[in-house]
């Protein structure tokens, strides 16, 4: 047998075993992040238009997580990369809501519809972008700091305060959902690669 070909064949088997193992790890990581998402991103107010458990937000987040390039191959090198706030794909309308939540929000904010804004201030809102433009215009909401000016306009227009829905993630620090699997991967990666290599060696020995 050509020794060079034999070595190359062994390297190919090791590479395949490592990639198979990393795909299993990817599934575990996605599950861990989604478990953390479900545990941390909970909204009790049914009036909120920014509920991350709404399927249009949750499903899209999970889908993008599944499509993230965890496994990278350059020449003969294989690496496993975890998503973070810089590398995760938050582009598009629906993901803006989740990005806002995960980045954290200092201060008290309320969700204001375009219609309510016009009622309170007598003009169209032009200085802000809605959180999600994928929904019908009537359902679009803007985050506004619950300042004395907004409180007064709310009371004068609707006869009371607390008419506007409080943004459920007001006064919330950054929520590190994407970091949920960091320690798990960091503490086990060397062992996983070693196990994959050992599995290949055992299979080769059995084939001798």
Image (cartoon, rainbow, N blue to C red):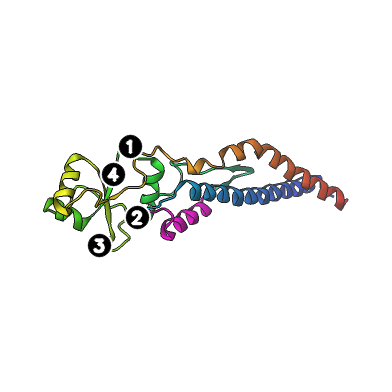
Q: Secondary structure at mark 2?
A: helix
Q: Of marks 2 and 3, which one's residue comes earlier in the chain?
A: 2
Q: Of marks 2 and 1, which one's residue comes earlier in the chain?
A: 2
Task: Name the residue carrying label 3.
Answer: 138
Task: Name the residue carrying label 2.
Answer: 93
Task: Name the residue carrying label 4.
Answer: 109
Residue 94: where, in percent of width, then height?
Answer: 37, 55
Residue lying at the far front of the rendered structure: 160
Q: Of marks 3 and 4, which one's residue comes earlier in the chain?
A: 4
The reply to whether discs 1 and 4 touch (Cβ–Cβ < 8 Å) is no
Cα distance in 3D space between marks 1 and 4: 9 Å
Compared with 12, 189 (above or below) is: above
Residues packed near mark 3 inside 10 Å, few (<14), some (14 to 19) or many (20 plus)? few
Q: Which residues are magenta?
A: 47-68
Cα distance in 3D space between marks 2 and 1: 22 Å
Work out whether residue 69 can be spotted. Answer: no
Residue lying at the far left of the rendered structure: 122
Cα distance in 3D space between marks 2 and 3: 16 Å
**Mark drawn on residue 44:** none
């Amino acid at each position: 047998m050509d020794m060079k070909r034999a070595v190359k064949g062994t390297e190919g088997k090791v590479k395949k075993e490592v990639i198979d193992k990393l795909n299993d790890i990817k599934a575990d990581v996605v599950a861990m992040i989604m478990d953390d998402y479900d545990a941390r991103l909970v909204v009790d107010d049914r009036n909120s238009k920014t509920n991350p458990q709404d399927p249009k937000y949750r499903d899209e987040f999970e889908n993008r997580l599944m499509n993230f390039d965890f496994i990278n191959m350059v020449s003969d090198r294989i690496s496993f990369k975890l998503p973070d706030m810089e590398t995760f794909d938050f582009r598009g309308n629906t993901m803006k809501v989740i990005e806002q939540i995960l980045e954290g929000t200092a201060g008290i904010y309320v969700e204001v519809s375009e219609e309510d804004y016009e009622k309170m201030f007598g003009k169209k809102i032009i200085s802000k972008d809605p959180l999600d433009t994928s929904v019908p215009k009537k359902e679009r909401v803007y985050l506004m700091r619950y300042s004395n000016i907004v409180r007064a306009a709310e009371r004068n227009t609707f006869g009371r305060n607390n008419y506007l829905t409080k943004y459920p993630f007001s006064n919330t620090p950054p929520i590190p959902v994407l970091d949920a699997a960091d320690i798990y991967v960091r503490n086990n990666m060397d062992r996983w690669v070693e196990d994959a290599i050992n599995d290949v060696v055992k299979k080769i020995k059995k084939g001798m």
